[in-house]
Amino acid sequence: MTLTVESLKTTDTHCPYCALQCGITLDPSPGAEAREPVLLSGRDFETNRGALCRKGYSAGNLLNHPERISTPLRRRTDGGFDPVSWEDALDEIAQQATRIRTQHGADAVAVFGAGGLTNEKAYQLGKFARLALGTSRIDYNGRFCMSSAAAAGNRAFGLDRGLPFPLADLDNASMILLLGSNVAETMPPFVRHLRNARDCGGLVVVDPRRSLTAELCAEGSGWHLQPTPGTDLELLLGLAHVLLSENLIDEDYLSTRTLGLASLRASVNPWWPERVATITGVPASEIRRTARALAAAASEAKTGGGPVYILTGRGVEQHANGTDTTTAAINIALLLGLPGTLGGGFGTITGQGNGQGGREHGQKSDQLPGYRKITDPSHRAHVAKVWGIDPEIIPGPGIPATELLHTLGTADGAKMLLVHGSNPALSSPDASKVIAGLRRLDFLVVCDFFLSETAAEADLVLPVLQWAEEEGTMTNLEGRVLRRRAALRPPAGARSELWILTELAKRLDAPGSFSADAREVFEELRLASAGGLADYSGIDWDDLDQGAAIYWPCPSSKTLNHTPGKRSGTPRLFLDGFAYPDALARLIPLYPGTSRPALHAPGKLALVTGRLLEHYQSGTQTRRVAELNAAAPEARLEIHPGTARAHGIRDGQRVAVRNERGEVVARATLSTAVRLDTVFLPFHFAGEQNANLLTDSTVDPISAMPEFKNASVSLHPLGDE
Ligand code: SF4
């Protein structure tokens, strides 16, 4: 079946994929009447300046896709699906939720959200879970994405905003230390913001793999540090040791803007470069060179030189010590006197399209809108007032994603799950446990526009709108709130998640009010966020409509004397102090070894997972775009030629990658980009190529981030069938 969408008007909007949220213009197709696909071009927005990556250029192909779901689907007993009416589907969900709550209690129904949902959907989903279902069990896939970086930002600065400065500030940087991020593949237009640092010879990339981004550090552009997987924390402690032992720190800044220097100094004493080199594999000379270069650049930045930035990505954050590792990177930035100045700073590069907004509005198990804490009585009272309910109605904190998903269908776990915009069967750690849990459930509902691997397990699948068919707001990696706009009339059978939640809330007789209108939900979100750390109360929908992209916090006091369409919110955080009552940042002493799994047993290899240029997240969308799939049709196991030789593996040969959790089968690509002790798999593929069948579900004790980036595996060459 071929689905069609009808073009309405030329519309400026943003890419549906990553957190760069590149500006896109959608044009009415000249062949709209003939039902041609939509025309799409990059437009001049600060993050992309007209450029798009190949994912963005081909995003229009998702809209008319023949595999798009066009009606609610109900599972038959033989495993297939039959179409059902919306009325019947919604009635059945409400009946099942009521039955299961009556039999097992409210927490037997759980909700799983996503960092790709608009702000309004994320907000309404959290409200729906707590008021309509009365469950504490809501969490989202951002737990697997930004949770450790968010926890680190909160404890060091008192506030988490991915980039606390405009992305364009990087354009003048003299030096950038980029840890665990492959922006050249994940968000290629980002690379142009690295240009000045490269020209200054100051781009330093830390990655166990020589990624495309690491290759930017060619001779004269910077250098690449290639640590043993899982040792980023020790490497950062080694850098801190050099800064402190050689007195390369900004003492004025530290004494006036931070707390905790003495404790930090004591904690890094044992991490001298020669010791760190034996753990990380990074030579002591390179550790000293990097620390000294950072200190020199930071010093020059204070006397007119270009600013200096330290940036982290999932490579260092997706570990069972991810909060400590990101904190160690922040410690370096603070020792250099960078955060909260115009001379540079620390930032973390958010990945999912609304990874920033998705973590602010209450779809996290421990959080209410506006970054409010669900355990804080005054926070609960504020949100309850906006919702028009008694605070007692709001359940307490739930459980984080890995625990929620790994206990599905068990005696203590949820019996029913509603999944919105996520594909946990593929994207969760130790994924076979999640697939088994999904199959144990009494009832599984999935909202998606394609039959993802999770939707394929569902009892009911509800078809939803896509990016170019819906109104709403997103918050990009800079903390800028921007408009997603409807340019196309959606297929007749699809509905918005806001409508679905509103209809379900009615059937469940939920307290409070729900709306299917994105602007109405945004207006309520503004009130709920008012006075919180992520304050949207001064952000005006009409301003966003006029093309403004506004940085939070934007309290309503900032609306005074503003010029319509020109309001900017707060582009740079912390210039007047950090978000603690005393305005001081916290240096946190760190003691490695307390929270990470053991490194590899003898004879095992480290499995590192990551992304490809052509694919996004679990690949539900991009694997269905013909040109992307043609360019990257399968997972390839990157393996060093020396390792391949030792295992008797040829280039192109099928290899079973195994550990105690499962097995992945993929063809080998021999490459010196990976270390001798490491293999690499992309995580976008399904079935026997699902890299998360091997990843470790040990979680960070602070953020509950799983250990995605460092699993022990063995290799077994297979025949070439
Ligand atoms: Fe831009 Fe990211 Fe979309 Fe690529 S995927 S066009 S980098 S927003």
Image (cartoon, helix red, strand yellow):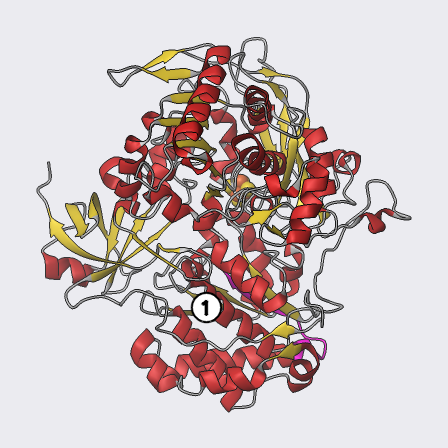
Report the residue that reaches farthest toward the bottom.
Answer: 246
- Where 426 falls versus 150 (above or below)? above
Q: Which image quadrant is residue 99 in?
A: top left
| Lateral position of residue 626 relative to residue 341, left or right | left
Q: Percent from the top left, x then y, of residue 531?
A: 74, 52
> In what quadrant of the picture does the C terminus appear?
top left
10 Å crowding of disc 1: few (<14), some (14-19), many (20+): many
Q: Percent from the top left, x then y, of residue 314?
A: 44, 56
Q: Which image quadrant is residue 508 in?
A: top right
Q: Magenta includes 303?
A: yes
Q: Which residue is mark 1?
A: 324
Q: Which residues are magenta?
A: 300-312
- Where 466 falls versus 344 (above or below)? above
Q: Residue at x 26, y 37 (%)?
A: 436
Q: Nearer the viewer, residue 670 or 492?
A: 492
At mark 1, the secondary structure is helix
| Lateral position of residue 142 relative to residue 208, left or right | right
Q: Residue at x 55, y 48 (%)?
A: 189
Q: Which image quadrant is residue 675 in?
A: bottom left
Q: Residue at x 9, y 55 (%)?
A: 648
Q: Residue at x 31, y 36 (%)?
A: 409
Three-letter amino acid code at the position of disc 1 = Asp
